[in-house]
Amino acid sequence: MADETRAVTVERLVTRHHAEVYRYAYRLSGSQADAEDLTQQAFLVAQEKLDQLRSEDSARSWLFTVTRNCFLRTLRGHSAQSAAAMDLDLNQIPEETWDDPIDHERLQDALNRLAPEFRVILVMYYFEDCSYKEIAEKLNLPAGTVMSRLSRAKGHLRRYLSPHGTLSDGHQ
Amino acid sequence: MDKRLLEQLEACRPGSSDLSLPEMSQLAARLASDPEVAAHAARIQHSDAKFRLAFQEVDVPDDMKDRLLQRLAIEAKSTPAEGPVESAKANWRIRRWAIAAVCLAATIVGLLTAWWAIPNHPELTDENVEQIAEGWFLLVDQAGTWHQDKRVSEQYPVSPRVRGKVRRWMPLPAVAYDRDAVAYDLTPSVGGPRITLIVLRAKVEGLMNRPDPSPPYTQKRSISAWQSGNLLYVVQVEGRELDYSRYVDTSSPRLARQTPRSFSSLIAARPMHGVIAMQAP
């Protein structure tokens, strides 16, 4: 009976949230293959730790957290890129607005050029709609660090995706 | 505009109450009094709104849900039963570990008993090799005690013949001849074939030094064994028949010095001289 309860709940989670989790994983990992792997890992962990989910209302956020943690675990052992290595001009306020649609491949390309510690914050901000305080809490970072990284990462995106803007390679 | 105010401006989400936070009071005052800053803020919010939408626009593979459910079902089968979600955590863990321990112990005892019951056990024949290899994979399925840390043992290295990254591993204590082995899960992706590699420090005389190019395909799986130095590798690919050749490199070694004998040909020819010589770990 317990197994049945668990199976139904996991199935429901997959049915309701697989698309969002995949999209989230794609923005984090940067490729379809990696996103599929990450999504699979996240749901396997979810299946294993289902007892940690207090209610289904918080399932979406919980699954994002699980996915993010899986992603961050895959980065262990990779050399972390320091903020200083992101040679970005802080003064990135756009001088004009642009109305052309955003090219999705180019958006992902811009994200992939960011160091993971910047990319994660950006995805949490835009995808999860987290405030800088929530990001700081979830990542266990000082709020000032989150603000600084968010500002730099947003500047990078705008510069890369602006119709008139270009970004040379090496800005990871 | 100084750095701190700019960072605060960037952190305010469109349509939120972020600007009303006490720590944002200086920024709020500046926005109210400086039209130029207000115009900058509007441009940032405009681009933020576009990014927010664009971040969500990712095509999801059509069969993603089905493949996930399939993979979870396979995983659930190989994982010991767990307690109800709402039960106390401590009880749940104790019960889970107890069931896993009993299953593992029963399986090991059963396999060892079966093994020692076979007469002339040191001889490797077409029949008992296949039985033994299948028993190991059965043990892996039933034990379900995977370690998730993707570690690869130096003593039991993964064969480069099998394409794929280690997802998890499982120790197989005293799996054959009182020798330890390690199982690696090399399953490539959601819904793909399930690939399990078992590594044992043992030497099988006459076994070829590469995986069988065309092993028997039964019950939707292919099993092949080969020798590499003092290591015996056995891979099981569960999926379509073609998956085996996709994920297992069966090409001949460049410097092969003797005519290899395939695992399946050993079975077909029913040889009498296959003898496993165990190597000290």
Image (tube, coloured by chain):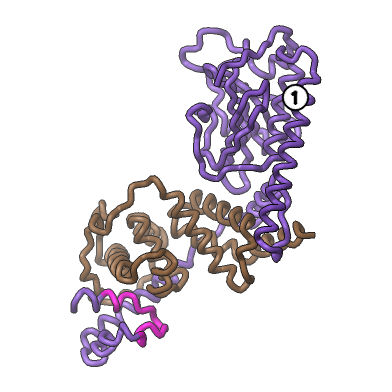
Chain colours: A brown, B purple
Decide if residue A139 is on the left or right side of residue B200. Answer: left
| Residue B16 magenta | yes
Residue B219 position, x and y percent, is: 75, 34
- The residue singled out by tag 1 in the image is B131
Decide if residue B84 is on the left or right side of residue B16. Answer: right
Q: Nearer the viewer, residue A121 or B211?
A: A121
Quadrant, the C terminus of chain A: bottom left
Q: Which residue is drawn at 67% across and 27% down?
A: B175
Q: Tell me the magenta residue range.
A: B7-21
- Chain letter behind tag 1: B
- Tell me the kind of residue under disc 1: Gln
Q: Which residue is drawn at 57% across and 63% down?
A: A19
Count of numbered circles in the view: 1
Quarter of the image holding residue B276? Answer: top right
Decide if residue B61 is on the left or right side of residue B270. Answer: left
Q: Which residue is drawn at 51% across and 26% down?
A: B155
> Which element type, helix, strand or loop, lies under badge 1?
helix
Q: Which residue is drawn at 66% across and 58% down?
A: B90
